Image (cartoon, rainbow, N blue to C red):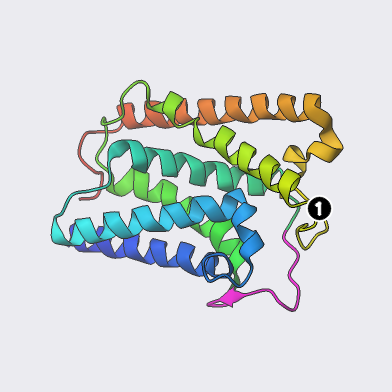
Amino acid sequence: MTRLIAGLFRLAVAAVSIAGTYNTWSGAKAWDWVYFTNQSNIVFAFVMLWAGAATLVRGVQPPAWLKGCITLYMAITGLVAWLILPPAVMGPDTLYVLGLPTATLVHVIAPIAAGADFLLFDAHRRFKWHYPLTWLLYFPVYLAFVLIRAAFFPDQPLPSGAMYPYSFVDLNALGWAGLGRNAVIYLGAFLLGGLALFLIDRILPDKPLLG
């Protein structure tokens, strides 16, 4: 029964992220791909579909490195939305799913569900010492993507009129020195988050708390 609950929970969580990123993967708002939130939620949906199906049929689970990596990114997504980003503004074109705006799905519900899944349904003590370091690789790649897009497509700003999705990566406003400082700060935050996740994984028992 617990395995069934875990499998269905994971599939339901995948559905949340899929619904929350509808405008991105459907092509309705192609510029949505530039947001870290949408990229992390789409990868999270894929991992949870894999994990949910594998749980139900007793198949091969996603590798521990990948599961830990996306859990970290979803935690960062939720924390940045909570602590740094301004509140989402709901306009006439805001998409709602089950009465909730998609911004709530991807910024609040999915990150909380990612943490719950890691704590309750994942096997633990699987992370190797170097995982927190390799989990850092995505942020520089994402930052390069944002900068290259702004440099090569200056005539395609976001709906807000800005060329950059977040103020903390806005090269025009920050300059290279400010951007470099923010990059170091965020890499440090990713590293601390990864180390915290690694330690939690070591502290928890081998077998899932539920399952």
Q: Position of residue 49 (x, y in %)?
A: 32, 60
Q: Position of residue 40 (x, y in %)?
A: 51, 50
Would you say residue 140 is visible in this rendering? yes
In this view, which residue lies farthest toward the right?
173
Q: Amino acid at mark 1?
A: Ala
Q: Is residue 119 above or below residue 9?
A: above
Would you say residue 113 is visible in this rendering? no
Quarter of the view holding residue 184:
top right
Q: Is residue 52 above or below residue 199?
A: below
The residue under the point 38% across, 57% down is: 46
User: Mark 1 falls on what kind of element?
Assistant: loop
Q: Nearer the viewer, residue 15 or 100?
A: 15
- Judge left or right: residue 30 versus residue 137: right
The residue segment tinted magenta is: 88-99
Q: Position of residue 140 (x, y in %)?
A: 58, 33
Q: Position of residue 175 (x, y in %)?
A: 83, 31
Please check the rendered image and state whether residue 96 is part of the magenta-colored stretch, yes or no.
Answer: yes
In this view, which residue lies farthest toward the top?
129
Disc count in the image?
1
The residue under the point 59% across, 57% down is: 33
Q: Give the crowd class for mark 1: few <14, some 14-19, many >=20 residues within 10 Å.
A: some
Quarter of the image that includes the N terminus = bottom left
Dominant secondary structure, magenta:
loop
In this view, which residue lies farthest toward the left?
58
The residue that disc 1 covers is: 162
- Judge left or right: residue 166 versus residue 37: right
Please check the rendered image and state whether residue 6 is part of the magenta-colored stretch, yes or no.
Answer: no
In this view, which residue lies farthest toward the front?
152
Quarter of the view holding residue 27:
bottom right
The residue under the point 23% across, 48% down is: 61
